[in-house]
Amino acid sequence: DVKVTQSSRYLVKRTGEKVFLECVQDMDHENMFWYRQDPGLGLRLIYFSYDVKMKEKGDIPEGYSVSREKKERFSLILESASTNQTSMYLCASRRTGGNQPQHFGDGTRLSIL
Amino acid sequence: QKEVEQDPGPLSVPEGAIVSLNCTYSNSAFQYFMWYRQYSRKGPELLMYTYSSGNKEDGRFTAQVDKSSKYISLFIRDSQPSDSATYLCAAYTGGFKTIFGAGTRLFVKA
């Protein structure tokens, strides 16, 4: 079974802090993704990475950056946290290729005070 | 217009009922279609995965894709209280980006 592990289930931070969310997958997947999920808005793609050190902006990259130094690990960074970044953050991974669905971690519920 | 539209519900049914969950999509280039189940405070879990048109069955679950009408369906037979969750439909062309519906909340009452 695919295992995608997010380092924290719940996180509380203050505005202006630099926040790191970590994600690790154990299936040697090439592609990794960060989403945020908000009521009524569904899943919105923040960034994705198709290989080590490669990254692409998603639909809502403003205020975020990412890092992928190793194949199994994909980090999301909130450069200066703001209250509108309070959300559920979901990491996903998949193998490259057309016939490969994404597999998700259990999410990090982040509150910015 | 969103590329994948899904009624948010909630949908409430009695135990044992047949549940029908539906999505429509606008991009005719979509080839791969998925259904995810998401329990409260958990991540989405891949439930069903189909390629192109047709039906796929797995136990009590049947996924159906009609590309001519751009319609995606998930049927749950003999629904159980443990099926209570949010169900997300999703589609992609074969590239990197998957487009998700907003999810339908389902409640199965015992």
Image (cartoon, coloured by chain):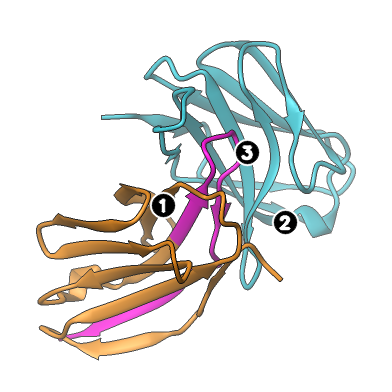
Chain colours: A cyan, B orange
Foreground mark, 1 or 2? Answer: 1
Chain letter of the residue carrying label 3: A
Sequence-first tag of 3 and 2 = 3
The crowd level at tag 2 (other Cα within 10 Å; few <14, some 14-19, many 20+) is some
Name the residue at 61% across, 21% down: A50
Foreground mark, 3 or 2? Answer: 3
Q: Which residue is mark 3?
A: A34
Q: In this rendering, would A79 be left or right of A69?
A: right
Q: Position of residue A46 (x, y in %)?
A: 72, 42
- Callout 3 amino acid: Trp
Q: Nearer the viewer, residue B4 or A4?
A: B4
Q: Which mark is residue B99?
A: none
| Relative to B8, residue B83 above or below | above
Marks 1 & 3 on one chain:
no
Name the residue at 52% across, 46% down: B92
Q: Are marks 1 and 3 in contact (CB under 8 Å)?
A: no
Chain letter of the residue carrying label 1: B
The crowd level at tag 1 (other Cα within 10 Å; few <14, some 14-19, many 20+) is many
Name the residue at 50% across, 16% down: A72
Q: Which residue is mark 1?
A: B33
Q: Specify the segment rendered in magenta.
A: B89-110
- Callout 1 amino acid: Phe
Q: Nearer the viewer, residue B60 or B108?
A: B60
Question: Is the N terminus of chain A in the top left, top right, bottom left or bottom right quadrant?
Answer: top left
> Does B96 lie within the magenta span?
yes
Q: Which residue is mark 2?
A: A86
| Relative to B88, residue B16 above or below | below
Q: Secondary structure at mark 1?
A: strand
